[in-house]
Image (cartoon, rainbow, N blue to C red):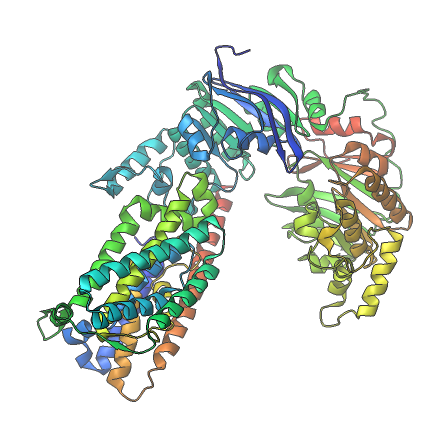
Amino acid sequence: MSDTNSLLEARGIGKAFLGITALDGVDFTLERGEIHALLGENGAGKSTLIKILTGVYSRDHGTMRLDGADVTPASVAEAQGLGIGTVYQEVNLLENLTVAENLFLGRQPRRFGLIDRREMRSRSKALLERYGLDIDVDALLSSYSVAVRQLVAIARAVDLSGKVLVLDEPTASLDAHEVEMLFAVLRRLREQGLGIIIITHFLNQVYAVADRVTVLRNGRLVGTRKLAELPRLELISMMLGRELQHITREHQAQDETVASTAEAPIRFSGYGKRGSVAPFDLDIRPGEVVGVAGLLGSGRTETAFLLFGIDRADSGTATVDNQQITLSSPEAAIASGFGFCPEERKTDGIIGDFSVADNIALAVQARQGWAKPISSREKAALAENFIKSLDIRPADPNRQMKFLSGGNQQKAILARWLATEPRLLILDEPTRGIDIGAHAEILKMIEKLCADGMSLVVISSELEELTAIAHRVIVLSDRKHIAELKGDRVTADNIMQAIAAPARTEAA
Amino acid sequence: MIHTRNLPFVTTLGIFVIAYALCVLQFPNMLSTRVIGNLLTDNAFLGIAAVGMTFVILSGGIDLSIGSVIAFTSVFVAVLVGSLGVHPLIAFAAVLVISTLFGSLMGAMIRYLGIPPFVVTLAGMFLARGAAYLISTESVPISHEMIDTIQGFYFRFPGGGRLTALAILMLLVFIIGAFIAGRTRFGANVYAIGGSQQSAELMGVPVGSTTVGIYALSGFLSGLAGIAYTLYTSSGYSLATVGVELDAIAAVVIGGTLLTGGVGLVAGTFIGILIQGLIQTYIVFDGTLSSWWTKIVIGILLFVFIVLQRGIIWYSNRRLAEGRLKEI
């Protein structure tokens, strides 16, 4: 298998955490002088694979060869020593140190046992000049932009390792110009024979800079392909795990009229936030389920954060019943009758040590103000009511939330918002990590809620789920709302095509 | 040009100079080498301990055991030398080994058992204090030829001031401390851990050995401070130096070190000590003020510095954000 050009070769890599398989027999080959993109949705196993390659985790199965020799890096430092350097997205360099100190941490030039600052400074300057950076290396790293920090991190990693460079979402917080600057550096490093692994969500960037792509899904290898020979649509179907059945471009102009006649009581226009989501228009009618589709990192969750006031929009207006409202905080959103079930249920949704009843009562309490506590009788009645109607198990309102299964936790969070009788409920990945039975129940519940006249915004990476429940689907890509599908056009194929369209199709 | 990084230190220095000038305006006698010499001698043990505390706080930790370790050291040395007739040098060596080991042990617990420094050193504080009581609950006087020699040793400043052995010891500790922090890999690692332990680890910093080293250093310097205290008071007393760790923390923070770690200078702590000493001296000169005014002024200064640090962080973040907007 090993051709002469392969630099890093991983075969049959497997890893399980507490009995749950995170990676299952994944093969990965990085060649000398190539930029290799690693793609996959949340939980696909990208970061597990990277962490195994860079010595953060140890692998359970498989072999790893670097330059033809078997290696098993047991720590980041060891991987660095072998020649594998990593630049992480956020946790990276130290902002409280100067640029030079960051570049030479742990390997400072010394004279008579003391750090030779002058030598360190001149070497830092020389090193950064190779990357086209002419900056004051004695200034704190925190005084520079993210793009410069990123380049400093790359300079350090390459200088330290020199064979393999792993970049974990390097462009997440860069603007277009900075991305170009970064890519120019990567191309130059490629010419020097480095193997570069890049993890990113932005397909445009994958096509712009990478030579080959490896797609993972659910801990398994979907495939490794040359990007020049891989149509965008096929790449997306690899990522979303759905075979393209019938690519039709027929009824495009039809079905635009459905329900759009009714005046929407909740409207967002030109709503957006710089660096988060480009301004978008969104009308939401009673009894309507608006689906939000897009790849990971396309701006789905950011859209939800804007709608619920977690992030403050810096452009556009929001109106409810023709009254302009300011969504400056979740509290304000709740006051306007909004509710939000976040994606990260464990960290953002539940309070694990509180009882089920307390968790359910939280939003009602927040809505009526903390000065007026809900009596324990009201709380018990509320809990009992929802435990029954949503079939939360075990049916014990005093059970601590953390002991419930994922599905039941999700139901309890739904109950929390339903108790406030919201007019708009935003659900971010409502069925992630939930068993199939509960999955169906939650979908059924969503249908019932909108039949009762509630509006829902549902974010999901499960296309089947979206097409099953949504009346309309907003498609996001690269932090823009690029398309809106209605009625018959809400199909998985159409969504994938919309995501794949490289140019922006303005929202219909 | 002043980097924002050094702004807290420069501010502290400015406050000290202004405060000293104001004191001198009111009491011209305060501008004398005698006052300065006494100030250094009186605060020598606190200064030595504060250097250790500087490293601990720079790494993002805290060491609450310092006062107790000083008390333990002084009682231990006093009993060994005063009651048992052991040579002071042997007693000093023994107590430094014990306090260093004690510090290393706390560092190891913090690192390898993942217990927060606050909790570990709180336990250490009770443990050391208890051990001091166990040795003796009395104030143990100490007298030895060598100790008398050390106590009697001084350089004479022009103007009648005395630079005592204790003051020299403290100054040496500050100078060596500043070198360790600024010019060694160990020092760089301390700053790195204080910036972000996770990042430091990912950048290959030996976090384990560095953490143990930091608390070992703090333990060693607490022991040394205890020796200085014993020499200063010519006795050992298990009830002494209660709360000295808090004075040390105050000196470090007033000296411009960020309580969250990663930013600060050993030299700043020196100024912090001088400011505390200056306030005490002023109260002595005034003669009518309660000595508790020291605490009140230090409290106010601490507030000012914490707010100042917040302000600097806020300001530099805003400047960075503005810079980004311009680029776009």
- The answer to whether residue B315 of the structure is visible from this angle is yes
- The image shows residue A62 at horizontal and vertical percentages of 57, 23
Q: Residue at x 35, y 50 (%)?
A: B213
- The image shows residue B68 at horizontal and vertical percentages of 36, 68
Q: Is residue B172 above or below residue A476?
A: below
Residue found at the very far front of the displayed protein: B84
Q: Quadrant of residue A261?
A: top right
Please indicate whether residue B139 sits to the left or right of residue A86 in the image.
left
Observer-nearest residue: B16 or B232? B232
Q: Is residue A284 above or below residue B145?
A: above
Please indicate whether residue A146 sits to the left or right of residue A235 in the image.
left
Please indicate whether residue B128 sits to the left or right of residue A86 in the image.
left
Q: Is residue A206 above or below residue B89?
A: above
Residue found at the very far bottom of the displayed protein: B288
How many marks on residues? Answer: 0
Q: Quadrant of the N terminus of chain A?
A: top right
Q: Quadrant of residue B243?
A: bottom left
- The image shows residue A378 at horizontal and vertical percentages of 83, 67
- The answer to whether residue A139 of the structure is visible from this angle is no
Q: Quadrant of the C terminus of chain A?
A: top right
Q: Residue at x 32, y 46 (%)?
A: B186
Q: Quadrant of residue A465?
A: top right
- The image shows residue B322 at horizontal and vertical percentages of 48, 49
